[in-house]
Image: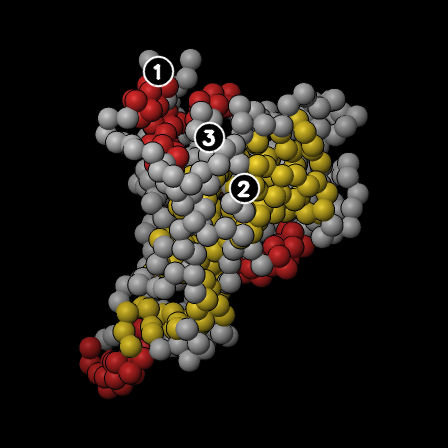
């Protein structure tokens, strides 16, 4: 990716126009200024950078502090290359941006849009949304209404909790449809994903190339035993936004995947514990550690997250997989929330309560068989959460509500106050040594 001024770019365009017949410059470069683009979305890749991804003939992003732009980022083909359609697919990383600034941008001939960079470290008072198990509107009719809730909310970014498109179940057209459905918010709000089982577990029908090829991620990491399709890297990642450290966790691809993640997550949490700019640690991924829904909690993941709960800033885990909403009481200080409510069919059971376990287990604080969006607001002293009602449908609903109303409301206070930095040597920390030990066992997973 290269960044050039608008004046220099104009000169280059004239030069290309004069010599293209002789030099064979690709038509995509010549037509990029006016080319079309869809499936537009972007991610934070660092405190001063974002990455845009799209499909179409357009080959650059024009951006700047106003709609006059002034800077152009030239795109390149992503790696790995998505295969859901013929594309072409593009990505462009914008670097050297100012923190906490709203930028204007346009891709090809698309209308003016805006994106924003992360705030300064320690900033509080921002809101994010989360949803999982979504799909495309060509297979699931409720998807657009759920995505509209997010668009109306204008969050700082959206955590997507796995099972993005169901391309392995409903066909490759659903992959492209999903990324067009979410454009009601993804043109202006960062799309921060975690992978689910439907992204990789039926390789003959879909695989991770369609997803890893559509995203650049901050501090992206490689997992042991990850599928060869889409290898290698982008299995999980982490980033700081304001006063929160967000750490994703990978799918359990094989023996040792989660123990490897746990060792690295321990260090990330150790560092966050002693960073005065950070008040909270949040983990997110696809599979639940606690669930009374269609998919029970993953006991291996449960043991690892329980061990990581010794970190006092760690207060929240968010996941999908079961197609319902469920919030736990604090478990070892950490609240677990399932929000597999993004629009694909609900997973009701043939039980009096529609949910697998009736009545609810003692650890379960609230649950609902209904579409919706999880909304999280972060201050210095607490996380305020709401499950916002989405459309009816997708199966049997045990909650009836007006779309946009609040179904569940809760507050998670900080587990202690911060304000000073304790001396800490990550190379010789007892915490680090202990963390590495508790994340390993003879077979690579907890006993």
Residue 19, image quadrant: bottom left
Secondary element at tag 2: loop
Disc on the earlier residue, 1 or 3: 3
Classed neighbour count for the residue bearing mark 3: other residues with Cα under 10 Å, few (<14), some (14–19), many (≥20):
many
Label 1 vs label 2: CA separation?
36 Å
- The quarter of the rendered structure image containing the C terminus is top left
Residue at the (68%, 50%) spot, across then down: 142
- Residue 326 % position (x, y): 65, 33
Disc on the earlier residue, 2 or 3: 3
For the residues labelled 2 and 3, say whether their Cβ atoms are less than 8 Å apart. no
- Residue 113 % position (x, y): 50, 70
Secondary element at tag 3: loop
Residue at the (42%, 41%) spot, across then down: 419
Residue occupied by mark 2: 381
Judging depth in this view, the residue of 90 and 440 nearest the camera is 440
Residue occupied by mark 3: 312
Residue 55, image quadrant: bottom left
């Amino acid at each position: 990716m290269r960044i050039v001024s608008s004046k220099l770019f104009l000169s280059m365009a004239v030069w290309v126009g004069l010599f293209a017949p002789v030099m064979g410059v690709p038509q995509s470069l010549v037509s990029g200024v006016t080319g079309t683009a869809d499936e537009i979305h972007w991610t934070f890749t660092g405190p001063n950078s974002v990455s845009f991804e799209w499909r179409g003939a357009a080959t650059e992003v024009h951006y700047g502090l106003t709609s006059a732009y002034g800077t152009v980022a030239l795109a390149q083909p992503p790696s790995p290359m998505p295969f859901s359609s013929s594309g072409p697919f593009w990505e462009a990383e914008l670097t050297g941006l100012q923190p906490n600034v709203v930028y204007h941008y346009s891709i090809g001939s698309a209308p003016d849009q805006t994106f924003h960079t992360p705030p300064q470290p320690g900033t509080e008072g921002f809101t994010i949304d989360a949803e999982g198990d979504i799909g495309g509107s060509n297979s699931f009719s409720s998807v657009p209404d759920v995505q509209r809730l997010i668009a109306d909310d204008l969050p700082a970014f959206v955590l997507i909790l796995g099972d993005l498109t169901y391309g392995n179940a409903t066909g490759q057209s659903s992959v492209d449809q999903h990324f067009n459905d979410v454009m009601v918010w993804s043109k202006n709000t960062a799309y921060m994903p975690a992978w689910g089982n439907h992204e990789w577990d039926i390789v003959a029908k879909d695989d991770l190339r369609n997803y890893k090829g559509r995203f650049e991620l901050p501090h992206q990491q490689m997992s042991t035993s990850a599928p060869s399709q889409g290898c290698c890297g982008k299995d999980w990642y982490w980033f700081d936004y304001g006063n929160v450290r967000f750490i994703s966790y990978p799918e359990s691809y094989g023996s040792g995947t989660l123990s490897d993640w746990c060792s690295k997550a321990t260090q990330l949490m150790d560092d966050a514990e002693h960073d005065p700019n950070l008040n909270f640690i949040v983990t997110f991924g696809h599979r639940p550690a606690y669930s009374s829904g269609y998919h029970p909690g993953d006991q291996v993941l449960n043991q690892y997250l329980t061990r990581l709960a010794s970190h006092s800033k760690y207060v929240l885990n968010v996941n999908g997989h079961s197609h319902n909403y469920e919030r736990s009481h604090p478990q070892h200080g950490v609240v677990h929330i399932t929000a597999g409510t993004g629009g694909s069919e609900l997973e009701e059971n043939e039980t009096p309560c529609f949910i697998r376990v009736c009545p609810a287990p003692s650890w379960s604080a609230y649950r609902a068989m209904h579409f919706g969006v999880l909304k999280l607001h972060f201050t210095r002293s607490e996380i305020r959460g709401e499950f916002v009602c989405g459309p009816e449908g997708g199966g049997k609903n045990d909650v009836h509500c007006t779309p946009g109303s609040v179904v569940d409301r809760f507050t998670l206070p900080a587990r202690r106050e911060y304000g000073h930095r304790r001396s800490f040597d990550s190379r010789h920390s007892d915490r680090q040594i202990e963390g590495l030990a508790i994340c390993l066992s003879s077979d690579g997973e907890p006993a």
